[in-house]
Amino acid sequence: MRREMVQVLHQERGPMLKRCLATLVVATAGLVLGACSPSEGGQHVVAPVPHTTPALTPITIRISLAQTRVIAGTSITGEAVLTNTTSKSITVEYCAADGWLEVGLVNSRITFEPANPAVACPPSIRLSPGPNRFPFDVVTHYQACVQSGGGSPSTNMPPCTTTGAPELPAGNYTTKVITNGLPPGTPTPQPISVTLLPAQG
């Protein structure tokens, strides 16, 4: 009687063992184990979860403005904070006289693309570990203008006035930061919204 019970138990476990072995899957990406159960369709597959780590950059940039609502033609003072997250000084690989850090205003019609003076000089800006502060001015007039008889005016290059480039049109703008000589991958700071009011007559 005992031998017969053992034999019956062995016969019942045989198909279940085959189903369990069928759930063991070796994938190229790794070993995936499936749980087995006496019922059909009990297979459970756990897929590997991709893990990505964002690249760390040694420099972060944050800017602030003294004002965000001014009359067109009025300069806005600001400050850029470049934080060196490493324990060593980092040299800005650019001639400081060429404008390694510039901030301007842009919108759907106005662009900010400052011309570099191309002065040949060795790098002189070094960022110490921790925050490094640099003041700047945001001009609210056009970067360039066309002298009388000097060519055709355009959206970003209107005719010059008696005092030079005219003020930007009233409206809403955002800041645009241009840097040169910083480590590759240095993120640009979040833009700040600026409102220019009509120039006084």
Image (cartoon, helix red, strand yellow):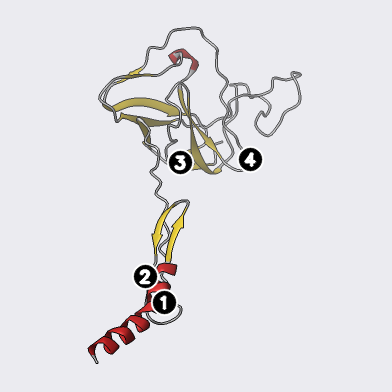
Which of pointers 4 and 1 lies earlier in the amino acid sequence? 1
Element assignment for label 4: loop
**Which image quarter is the C terminus in?**
top right
Amino acid type at circle 4 is Arg
Q: Are marks 4 and 2 in contact (CB under 8 Å)?
A: no
Relative vertical location of residue 53 with respect to residue 177 in this rendering, above or below: below
Which of pointers 2 and 1 lies earlier in the amino acid sequence? 2
Q: Which residue is mark 4?
A: 109
Q: Which mark is residue 35?
A: 2
Which of pointers 3 and 2 lies earlier in the amino acid sequence? 2
Q: Which residue is mark 1?
A: 42
Q: Is residue 79 left or right of residue 107?
A: left
Residue at (41%, 70%) from the top-left corner?
44
Calculate the distance from the C-alpha at mark 4 to the C-alpha at mark 1: 61 Å
Crowd rating for badge 3 (residues with CA inside 10 Å; few <14, some 14–19, many 20+): some
Q: Are marks 4 and 1 in contact (CB under 8 Å)?
A: no
Residue at (52%, 35%) from the top-left corner?
105
Of badges 1 and 3, the one in the foreground is 1
